[in-house]
Image (cartoon, rainbow, N blue to C red):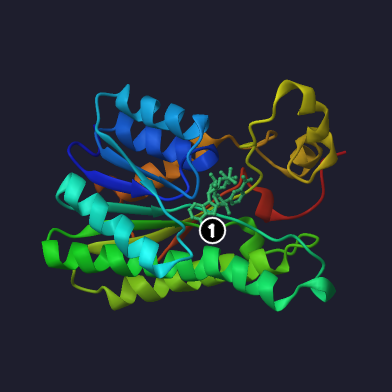
């Protein structure tokens, strides 16, 4: 097991990629704090899945865009687990609009979640890690959209580019503390949990099989593809890796056109 006895907090992990990360860290021996802005059956299922690996799972309902809630979440996590070894910044909420229609409120909402939220969760966790004196790991979710423009996703792309720059900056600022800071940039990940009566809508969005011809791996990614990359960066195998973004996109960003 790569993470025996570690204490990990994963934001936005009631479903999707965050859930896959929470469960994989537990499978490798970590106790896990599951954060999300809302608690529903999916959240209960994630907690159960973590516990099914014999690990402790704690629930932390908080809006990562609110500094008071971030501080309360970290305080509660530290009370429950005694320390924090790993933070995974995964939560996301987006406003998808054409550039010309984005309002100040849209900007504040998305940047508040995807940039400010990641920044202050990292700062609060890093403060605790520095005080503990045992090093630690911070991994943030970026996206291939930090590197390419998708329709109506300019603010999202800006936030993810910011996450990658923040990752480098935090790695440097935390020199000598033993805290490694990295990011993972997923490509097309089929993480949506669609009820059977909505399955037909899969073919109508960008996040679908329609993208497969552009992906050298010849398939969409699945949440576990991302969880494995996060696990690597949290593990002793990545002890000398810091300030990096690991792109996990099946080769999508190699560019070019599909094979005929
Ligand atoms: N799915 C993909 O194809 C893909 C591709 C590239 C990058 N990513 C990144 O991976 C991460 C996970 O994506 P996903 O597809 O699993 O997303 P998702 O929407 O399925 O899950 C995100 C979770 O974050 C929670 N959340 C939203 N706002 C929050 C807040 N303010 N505080 C706390 N929790 C909040 C949501 O409730 C949700 O449970 C995101 O950072 C996303 O940008 C995903």
Which residue is pictured at 18% across the width and 51% down the height? 79
* Badge count: 1
Q: Which residue is mark 1?
A: 142
Residue neighbourhood size for the residue with mark 1, other residues' Cα within 10 Å, grouped as few (<14), some (14–19), many (≥20):
many
Which residue is pictured at 39% across the width and 52% down the height? 88
Most foreground residue, 144 or 193: 193
Vertical side of 131 occupied by 88: above or below: above
Q: Residue 94 in the image: x percent, y percent?
A: 65, 58
Determine whether the beta carbon of the residue marked 1 sits less than 8 angstroms from the nearest atom of ligand 1: yes
Most foreground residue, 73 or 234: 73
Could one spot residue 23 in this view of the protein? yes
Q: Residue 157 in the image: x percent, y percent?
A: 65, 66
Most foreground residue, 115 or 68: 68
Q: Residue 109 in the image: x percent, y percent?
A: 61, 67
| Rendered image quadrant of residue 204 | top right
Could one spot residue 178 in this view of the protein? no
Vertical side of 205 occupied by 169: above or below: below
Which residue is pictured at 61% across the width and 47% down the height? 249
Q: Residue 133 in the image: x percent, y percent?
A: 11, 63
- Along the horizontal axis of the image, is 229 left or right of 30? right
Which residue is pictured at 70% across the width and 61% down the height? 95
| Rendered image quadrant of residue 1 | top left
* Mark 1 secondary-structure assignment: loop
The C terminus appears in which quarter of the rendering?
top right
């Amino acid at each position: 097991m790569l993470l025996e006895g570690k204490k990990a907090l994963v934001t936005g992990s009631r479903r999707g990629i965050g859930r896959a990360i929470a469960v994989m860290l537990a499978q490798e021996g970590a106790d896990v704090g599951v954060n999300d802005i809302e608690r529903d059956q999916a959240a209960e299922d994630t907690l159960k899945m973590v516990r099914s690996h014999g690990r402790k799972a704690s629930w932390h309902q908080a809006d990562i865009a609110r500094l008071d809630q971030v501080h309360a979440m970290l305080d509660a996590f530290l009370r429950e687990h005694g320390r924090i070894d790993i933070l995974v910044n995964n939560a996301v909420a987006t406003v998808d609009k054409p550039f010309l229609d984005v309002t100040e409120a849209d900007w504040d909402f998305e940047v508040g979640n995807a940039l400010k939220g990641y920044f202050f969760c990292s700062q609060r966790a890093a403060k605790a890690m520095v005080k503990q004196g045992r090093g630690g790991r911070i991994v943030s979710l970026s996206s291939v959209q930090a590197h390419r423009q998708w329709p109506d996703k300019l603010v999202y792309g800006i936030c993810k580019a910011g996450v990658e720059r923040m990752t480098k900056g935090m790695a440097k600022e935390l020199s000598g503390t033993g805290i490694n800071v990295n990011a993972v940039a997923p490509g097309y990940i089929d993480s949506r949990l669609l009820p059977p009566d909505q399955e037909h809508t899969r073919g109508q969005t960008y996040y679908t099989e329609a993208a497969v011809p552009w992906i050298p791996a010849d398939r969409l990614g699945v949440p576990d593809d991302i969880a494995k990359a996060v696990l690597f960066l949290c593990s002793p195998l990545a002890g000398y890796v810091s300030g990096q973004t690991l792109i996990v996109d099946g080769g999508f960003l190699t560019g070019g056109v599909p094979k005929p």
